[in-house]
Image (cartoon, grey):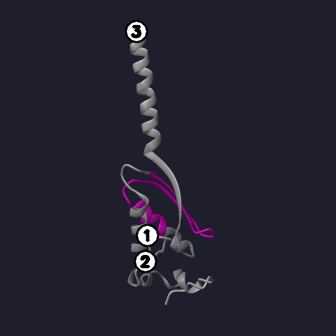
Amino acid sequence: MKKTIIFTFLMLISVTVFAQEKNKKLTMEVDGKCEMCKMRIEKAALGVKGVKYALWDIPSHQLSLIIDERKTDPMKIKTALVTVGHDTKELKATEEAYNSVHPCCKYREDNKNGSKEH
């Protein structure tokens, strides 16, 4: 009986630990400017298998995510973002992808920190 109780307790702990590893919250910086950027960024992130939640904040440029780490990783999400024309700290959108965004979404021209791309 004692072994059964211990076994059941250990199984419950392992299931709880496994469930906690399934969903991970993370944030990343993504360049953009407006509501159209917000919709494009969130749609691209949610299009990656394993992304359960995506919310991009316009003023801070922070993309908040909940992901299933068994199905995706941050680099897959960043790759999807640059594909639709939005830079991240690690990856930059190609000129072709960047030029595909609406003219009001051109965030590189507004970059005031001296790293303006040409």
Q: Secondary structure at mark 1?
A: helix
| Residue sitting nearer the eye, 30 or 117 | 117
Residue tagged by mark 3?
Answer: 1
Residue tagged by mark 2?
Answer: 93
Residue drawn 39% across the image and 20% down it:
7
Compare marks 1 and 2 and give the one earlier in the sequence. Answer: 1
Residue 58 left/right relative to 65: right
Amino acid type shown at disc 3: Met
Compare marks 3 and 2 and give the one earlier in the sequence. Answer: 3
Report how far apart the C-alphas of labels 1 and 2 lie in the structure.
8 Å
Give the total of numbered labels.
3
Residue drawn 47% across the image and 40% down it:
20
Judge whether residue 102 is colored magenta: no
Number of the front mark, 3 or 2: 3
Q: Secondary structure at mark 3?
A: loop
Please tell me how crowded label 3 is: few (under 14), some (14-19), or many (20+) other residues with Cα within 10 Å: few
Specify the segment rendered in magenta: 40-67
- Quadrant in the picture for the N terminus: top left
Residue tagged by mark 1?
Answer: 81
